[in-house]
Image (cartoon, rainbow, N blue to C red):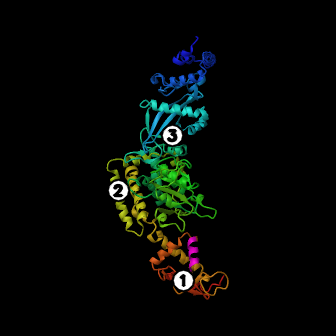
Amino acid sequence: MDYTKEDYLETDKPFAELFAVKNPFDQKRLLEKMAIAAKAVGVSNFKSLYAAYCESQRGALVPEDNLTCADGQPQELNCGDWRCDEYGVRRGQGMYETVACQNPVTISRRFVNIDTGAEKVELAFRKDGHWRKLIIACSQYANPLELMKLADVGMGINKRMAVDLSDYLTDLYGLNDGRLPVSKSVGRLGWVSDSLFSPYVDGLVYDGGPEYAAIFNATRPAGTYLQWKAAAAAFRLESYAARIVLAASFASVLVKPLGVLPFFVHLWGVDSSTGKTVALMAAASVWACPEMGKYIKTFDGTDVGYERTAAFLNSLPMCIDELQLAKNSRGQVVFNVYRLSQGAGRIRGNKMGGVDITPTWANAMITTGETPINTLGAGAGAVNRVIEIECTSAHKVVGNGHAAAQAFRRSYGHAGRDFVEHLLNPGAVDYAKKLYNAAFAQLNRAETTDKQAMAAALIVTADQLATEWIFKDGQCLTSADLGQFLASRAAVSLGARGYDYMCDWVAQNVNRLRPDVEQGDVYGVLDGDWVYIINSVFRRVADEAGYNPTALLSYLKGEKLIKTSGGKTTVTKRMGGSVMRCVCLHLPHESEQATIECTDFTPL
């Protein structure tokens, strides 16, 4: 049809004729012909006018009349001015057609996190004749740069297409409010509220990252509950260590409802085949698969990794094997007990200029190794939170470790759910608090600290509840059973341990603490039951042993174990013709006797 200049400028007839041509090649060929014809009648911008007309037609589509229609799709969704079919996702016509993806893509479900309220969506796309599904955050499909990563899972997109696909998914999400099914989701384990515990919520879906999917999937039960009960009941009777570790696993979920601090139970011993790892497997089997690498981790990790794993487990026990993997080249343990026992991670900034959400947790840490987990100079806060149990060949955790390990590998994951379900019954938490308060009062009368008593009382409480609710054999741990493994107040005190260390150092270096040293350095001088240690030497020795010199001197001053002058923690002493500023340390009678016996040693 021949059109006049008025037809091009005052009507949409020529543009509608061209828009109605569906074949891309035919449409492009007709576009060139009509552009030439339009120019002949004085309209030189026909192509730009047609582009504007195509844009206007996008809003002219009736949304409810345009539904996704890919074969086998989860459900029909309103896709606005987009087309989603076997050929992918597109909109527009002919040369103005936009391709967002070469695969049919749709949203099959919304997920609302019961912990944070954040939403994620389940994308479904067809590849090789099959529909695949994956969960992504809403912020990911809203950001084309993040959306490009979906090419790694087989979705046919590139950088240019990612922008259009982002628009398509945004439209799809907004146009189908109320049509998409909604599911509860969670990105961690443990207490979500007073009445919800992950993963024991019907219909709950894991929406976290792949890095913790293995742990979440490991919480699925296997074998039979009766078989696990039989194996666990026999294991409990093997030793105190076995009873304590198993009880600590149950106690982990009591930390939050009873308002107790996170704590460690550490099994250590230089002898092999004492059952330490088997005990860790028993503890893990309460909740999940006890295979190494699934639920149980090793000490071959970073501080950030430990924090994030603890935050993911949240209320479930964190089981870590082989402390020796956390040693540096000098054989020193570099694991930070205090940081994990605080129950909160570090404050970290993000690339957006703000700070990330601080990870938190409230659980028990059950660990094993060849040495104690706390170093010599570990602070009182760290020592307070660890119950250490030495395992030897004469005092094994379990006799037949191989049989026990096989039993726990076959059956696991039942007892934890049963324990939590009992705990959710009306009055159960109040009953647990009553047991805890009684055990704490009894333990607190002994020569131990409050925090040690808290951890021990929680273990006693958990064992009593597990005996009553699960095992029903009347075999309960008592406060006296736990008392033998608790550190005394003196052992916990960093100042007291520092004083003992310095007294030992004096006995070891008596030949350097005399004015007539013929060779080598002079460290100070002995004077009866007092020893004058050169201030710089004292500070260096204390610091190398892991004790803060200023804090140690403050403790010694408060306990009147050093002489002071003018409010200072040092005094002056003449040695070898020079006046030196020294720390004047009082020696206990035992150390004094040892010093006297050493005075005949030949100088170094």
Q: Is disc 3 surrounded by few (<14), some (14 to 19) or many (20+) residues within 10 Å?
A: few
| Observer able to see residue 108 | yes
Give amino acid for label 1. Val
Closest to the camera, between mark 1 and mark 3, is 3
Give amino acid for label 3. Ser
Closest to the camera, between mark 2 and mark 1, is 1
* Secondary structure state at the residue bearing disc 2: helix
Q: Which residue is mark 1?
A: 531
Horizontal and vertical percent position of residue 407: 51, 48
Look at the image and tell me in which quarter the N terminus lies: top right
Residue 433, numbered label: 2
Q: Is disc 1 surrounded by few (<14), some (14 to 19) or many (20+) residues within 10 Å?
A: many
Residue 238 drawn above or below residue 484:
above
- Cα separation, mark 2 vs mark 1, equals 51 Å
Instruction: Look at the numbered discs 3 and 2 and tell me whether their residues touch, using CB distance below 8 Å.
Output: no
- Cα separation, mark 1 vs mark 3, equals 67 Å
Q: Quadrant of residue 321?
A: bottom right
The residue closer to the viewer here, 232 or 201, is: 201
Range drawn in magenta:
534-543
Earlier sequence position, callout 1 versus callout 3: 3
Residue 525 drawn above or below residue 433:
below
* Secondary structure state at the residue bearing disc 1: strand
Which residue is located at x 38 percent, y 66 percent?
Answer: 444
| Observer able to see residue 237 | no
Residue 598, numbered label: none
